[in-house]
């Protein structure tokens, strides 16, 4: 982005009206005029319906500025450079006498300790996105350019040590230095001398763009990956050459297929769903998947759509079993024609052509998979997901055989539900609210600041639900959040994972509100979205009111219409 | 018709001072325009350097105080190159 573009974007954003401003703060120790413009422009590009208001930094004190953040701030951007650790490390106040080495290191150490302290405090109010020194480490010792000197080593160790401490502070995210390493012109001496800003204009744009990516990712991580087999998972056409001739090794110059397989294994261990869509004879393909030298456990692929039908049909079946939308899925195939056929039916699906015989291309693809599927945290629910989908498929089959008497099916499930009422921070609950679409009261998403505010508000009531039955554990699958208003609960968020549908868990949530928490009335802040038909059906089963705005549900009405529940309940109330 | 050189400079000024008309831009100076403070100068220099793909010489910075003077600096620079 050019500075001129940034200025134009920000000027045009001023016409956005009728929405809350996006309050953010910028903390850095140098003149930040261009930095502010780029940051605002990237924010405006990412969040298209709000005006970014940036609390400007206190000149000369990036770390001290953390004390002065406004309370309504929703995100803090902190940029630390070497001169913030000791001004003598910058060009304007440079003092490179070797005799100062010890003193400078001591100052830097104290400043970094202060940084950890201030950041811990600031992050309890709003999430902080940090860029640690990006410029080359300054050297004070007269060593040859190519030799690592002890001063630089000590300085870099101090920063790395601080980075480790910051990484465990909740609410702090640190920009990976590697993400900016391709930017060759980070430093601008002229800018530094004239305006006191050490970064080049190009680097300012890149840096602020990545900080905004860190704070407000453009797309949530994908959930599932569907792969082809021949010339993708392995080199060769198994139906033509036979099981012994397909390969993924050095001898056949096909090692990158092994790298791809290993990446799939790693993704599955993070909770990414894997499936196969292959035009093949099923028995022959299975012989390939049974080879013991495969670098990915073939059992992780579920479902496996291996037949001669259209791949778009296979994708439809897989999406139905996974019960996720096409825009959460990546399809990989070596054939451009197959990719096009799939996209003609599923335009939302992301596709990549497997670059067979292009080793560098495969390496780039594997790296991209890391970006597309990476999550901040991998929860136990992520690890359970693949297993629970198989169990769900089994349960669906069984439910199909109990169509005449679903109550009998529910009775035989031996379901155990743990409901916890607590406002402590729960990353899984936050994640569920921000990704669940179908059983979602209003589609409202929460930013980290709103999430923090809810936890700190004494009138907040938050229920989380964990579920397991004879088919296995589903983990945490439901969250309900409301505000206590006397004997009424105003429910502003309510979601239930689609994996847990048809278990009457939603009814149990309402029962807890009326029985255990003793509310007389529940007001559901409902809003129709493109996908939340399942919750609309539930509300319609209790209420004759038009489905819009606040829908009131009285205790008596609920119990008049509530079907029998068969869960074994563990109830935890964290007062 | 305005010379092309002038139009480019007006575009730069319009980016930094979007409320000014072209006529006001041609007359603009630090003395006459309250919005044109030292921070606006920094922004103006960066925008001009980006637009003209040049680095303003340190000796010229003191003359970045009016549209007319900046125009002159850029013309001189153009003639020299």
Image: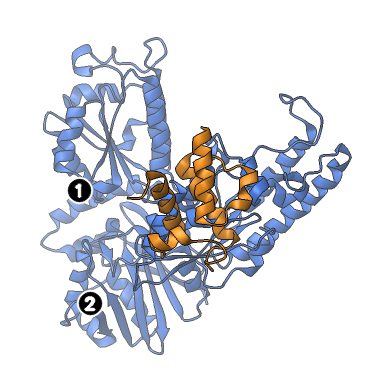
Residue corresponding to mark 1: A320
**Answer yes or no: do the residues labelled 2 and 1 have beta carbons within 8 Å?**
no
Closest to the observer: A47 or A352? A47
Q: Quadrant of residue A100?
A: top right
- Disc 2: host chain: A
Structure colour scheme: by chain
Q: Residue furthest right?
A: A99
Residue drawn at point x = 31 percent, y = 21 percent: A356
Chain A: colour as depicted: blue
Instruction: Determine which of the numbered discs, if any, sits on residue A557 in the image.
Output: none
| Image location (x, y in percent) of residue A452 | 50, 68
| Residue that appears at 54% across and 45% down | B73
**Residue receiving disc 2:** A562
Colour in which the image shows chain B = orange
Per the image, label 2 sits on a secondary structure element best described as loop
Q: Residue furthest top?
A: A251
Kindly state the secondary structure of the residue where label 1 is placed: helix
Image check: A181 left or right of A546?
A: right
């Amino acid at each position: 982005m050019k500075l001129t573009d940034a200025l134009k974007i920000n000027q045009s954003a001023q016409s956005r009206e009728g929405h809350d401003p996006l309050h953010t703060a910028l903390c850095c120790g140098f003149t930040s005029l261009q930095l502010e413009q780029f940051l605002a422009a990237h924010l405006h590009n990412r969040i298209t319906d709000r005006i970014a208001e940036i609390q400007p930094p206190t000149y000369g004190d990036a770390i001290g500025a953390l004390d002065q953040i406004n309370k309504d701030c929703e995100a803090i951007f902190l940029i630390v450079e070497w001169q913030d650790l000791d001004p003598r490390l910058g060009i304007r106040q440079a003092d490179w006498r070797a005799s100062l080495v010890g003193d400078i290191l001591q100052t830097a150490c104290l400043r970094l300790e202060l940084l950890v302290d201030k950041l811990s405090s600031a992050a309890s109010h709003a999430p902080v996105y940090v860029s640690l020194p990006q410029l080359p480490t300054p050297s004070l010792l007269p060593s040859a350019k190519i030799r690592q000197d002890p001063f630089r080593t000590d300085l870099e160790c101090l920063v790395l040590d601080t980075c480790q401490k910051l990484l465990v502070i909740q609410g702090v995210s640190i920009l990976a230095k590697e993400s900016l390493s391709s930017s060759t012109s980070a430093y601008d001496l002229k800018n530094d001398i004239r305006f006191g800003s050490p970064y080049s204009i190009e680097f300012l744009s890149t840096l602020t763009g990545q900080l905004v990516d860190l704070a407000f990712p453009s797309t949530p991580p994908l959930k599932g990956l569907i792969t082809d087999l021949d010339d993708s998972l392995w080199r060769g056409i198994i139906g033509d050459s036979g099981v012994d001739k397909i390969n993924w090794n050095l001898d056949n110059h096909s090692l990158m297929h092994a790298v791809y397989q290993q990446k799939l294994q790693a993704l599955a261990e993070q909770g990414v769903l894997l499936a196969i869509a292959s035009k093949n004879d099923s028995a022959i393909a299975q012989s390939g998947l049974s080879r013991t030298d495969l670098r990915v456990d073939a059992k992780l692929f579920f479902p496996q759509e291996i037949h001669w039908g259209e791949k778009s049909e296979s994708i439809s079946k897989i999406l139905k079993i996974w019960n996720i939308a096409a825009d959460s899925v990546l399809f990989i195939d070596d054939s451009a024609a197959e990719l096009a056929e799939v996209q003609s039916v599923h335009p939302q699906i992301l596709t990549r052509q497997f670059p067979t015989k292009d080793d560098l291309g495969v390496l780039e693809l594997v790296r991209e998979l890391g970006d597309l599927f990476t999550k901040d945290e991998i929860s136990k629910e992520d690890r359970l997901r693949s297993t629970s989908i198989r169990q769900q498929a089994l349960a669906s089959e069984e439910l199909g055989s109990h169509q005449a008497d679903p109550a009998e099916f529910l009775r035989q499930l031996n379901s155990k539900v743990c409901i916890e009422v607590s406002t402590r921070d729960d990353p899984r609950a936050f994640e569920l609210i921000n990704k669940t679409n179908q059983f979602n009261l209003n589609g409202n998403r929460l930013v980290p600041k709103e999430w923090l505010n809810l936890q700190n508000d004494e009138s907040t009531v938050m229920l989380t639900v964990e579920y397991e039955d004879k088919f296995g554990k589903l983990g945490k699958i439901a969250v309900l959040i409301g505000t206590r208003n006397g004997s009424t609960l105003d429910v502003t968020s309510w979601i239930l994972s689609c994996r847990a549908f048809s278990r009457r868990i939603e009814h149990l949530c309402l029962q807890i509100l009326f029985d255990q928490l003793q509310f007389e009335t529940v007001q559901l802040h409902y809003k129709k979205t493109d996908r939340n038909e399942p919750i609309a059906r539930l509300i319609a089963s209790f209420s004759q009111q038009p489905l819009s705005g606040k829908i009131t549900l009285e205790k008596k009405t609920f119990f008049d219409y509530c079907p029998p529940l068969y869960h074994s309940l563990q109830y935890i109330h964290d007062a | 018709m305005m010379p092309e050189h002038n139009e480019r400079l007006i575009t730069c000024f319009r980016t930094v001072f979007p409320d000014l008309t072209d006529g006001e831009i041609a007359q603009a100076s630090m003395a006459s325009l309250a919005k044109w403070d030292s921070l606006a100068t920094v922004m103006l220099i960066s925008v001009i350097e980006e637009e003209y793909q040049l680095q303003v010489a340190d000796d010229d910075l003191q003359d970045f105080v009016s549209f007319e003077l900046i125009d002159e600096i850029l013309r001189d620079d153009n003639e020299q190159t």
